[in-house]
């Protein structure tokens, strides 16, 4: 049985160092492709490009993952920057929003991770809380907390029990985007997963945590199986 090709969006950094080199680079933490591979897919890095090309890119993929990364620029959801909001990544925002819209339009299975879930919400008219406490570990260190699935949702069909997840974020969903419903919450009420209400948009899921930093393959395996179909 052939393995589905899963495209994962990447960082675009002005300077990165490896060996003797210090150059601009498209980057992706190794946890993402390793998770795709462990779940039975082929991983492909999809760096930022002209948003007009997103439809063509998605057409060559069996599934799309929008990876974690920097804060979404608040102008994307009509807000002024909070003092704790990070610097914008405008090229990446534009490209990943275009990928999300292309995947939704084509019915290509789509998984948003952390920033990816937030962008999914913004793409459908939702807004974000720009700063909250308690979901970050030390700088550059993932924390863990429990998420509770909402019965009857796609996420609950994949992970039916409360579970501990790796987390590193200081922003979250505020107003939920059109056609989306929360499908998991943290114990403090933070929305931890989003998905379409009903089946009209195909296989779409956003999770606020980082499954690529854990051992639970179920969310990625569900994406890969949807992509295989």
Image (cartoon, grey):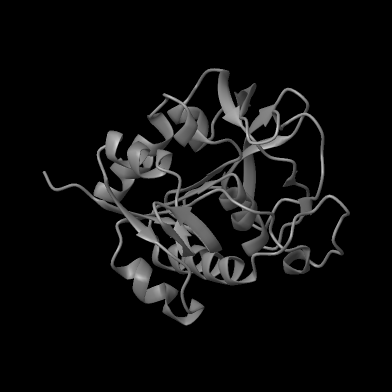
Residue at coordinates 69% horizontally, 54% vertically from top-left? 71
Task: Answer with the quarter of the image where residue 183 lies.
Answer: top right
Left-right relation of 78 to 152: right
Task: Tell me where residue 188 appears, x and y as whole percent.
Answer: 78, 26
Task: Tell me where residue 134 appears, x and y as whole percent.
Answer: 78, 29
Front residue of 123/213: it is 213
Task: Tell me where residue 152 appears, x and y as whole percent.
Answer: 54, 31
10 vs 152: above or below: below
Counting labels gives: 0
Which residue ends up furthest to the front in the rendered image?
20
Left-right relation of 207 to 29: right
Which residue ends up furthest to the left in the rendered image?
1
- Is residue 33 at all visible to an observer of this figure? yes
Residue at coordinates 46% horizontally, 74% vertically from top-left? 49
Task: Answer with the quarter of the image where residue 158 lies.
Answer: top left
Image quadrant containing the N terminus: top left
Left-right relation of 226 to 113: left
Task: Tell me where residue 98 appears, x and y as whole percent.
Answer: 52, 70
Residue at coordinates 48% horizontally, 54% vertically from top-left? 17
Front residue of 181/49: it is 49
94 vs 209: above or below: below
Left-right relation of 196 to 71: left
Task: Answer with the quarter of the image where residue 82 lies.
Answer: bottom right
Front residue of 183/41: it is 41
Residue at coordinates 57% horizontally, 28% vertically from top-left? 166
187 vs 47: above or below: above
- Is residue 200 at all visible to an observer of this figure? no
């Amino acid at each position: 049985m052939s393995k589905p090709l899963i495209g994962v969006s990447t960082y675009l950094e002005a300077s990165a160092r490896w060996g003797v080199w210090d150059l601009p680079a498209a980057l992706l933490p190794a946890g993402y492709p390793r998770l795709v591979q462990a779940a039975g897919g082929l991983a492909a890095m999809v760096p930022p490009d002209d948003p007009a090309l997103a439809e063509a890119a998605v057409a060559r993929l069996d599934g799309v993952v929008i990876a974690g990364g920097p804060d979404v620029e608040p102008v994307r959801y009509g807000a002024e920057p909070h003092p704790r909001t990070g610097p914008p990544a405008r090229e990446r925002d534009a490209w990943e929003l275009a990928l999300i819209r292309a995947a939704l339009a084509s019915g290509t299975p789509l998984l948003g991770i952390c920033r990816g879930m937030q962008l999914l919400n913004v793409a459908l008219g939702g807004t974000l809380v720009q700063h909250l406490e308690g979901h970050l570990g030390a700088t550059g260190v993932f924390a863990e907390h429990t998420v509770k699935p909402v019965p009857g949702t796609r996420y609950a069909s994949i992970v039916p029990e409360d579970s501990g997840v790796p987390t590193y974020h200081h922003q979250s969903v505020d107003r939920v985007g059109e056609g989306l419903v929360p499908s998991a919450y943290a114990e403090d009420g933070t929305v931890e997963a989003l998905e379409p209400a009903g089946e009209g948009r195909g296989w779409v899921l956003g999770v606020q945590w980082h499954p690529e930093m854990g051992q639970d393959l179920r969310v990625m395996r569900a994406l890969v199986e949807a992509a295989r179909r």
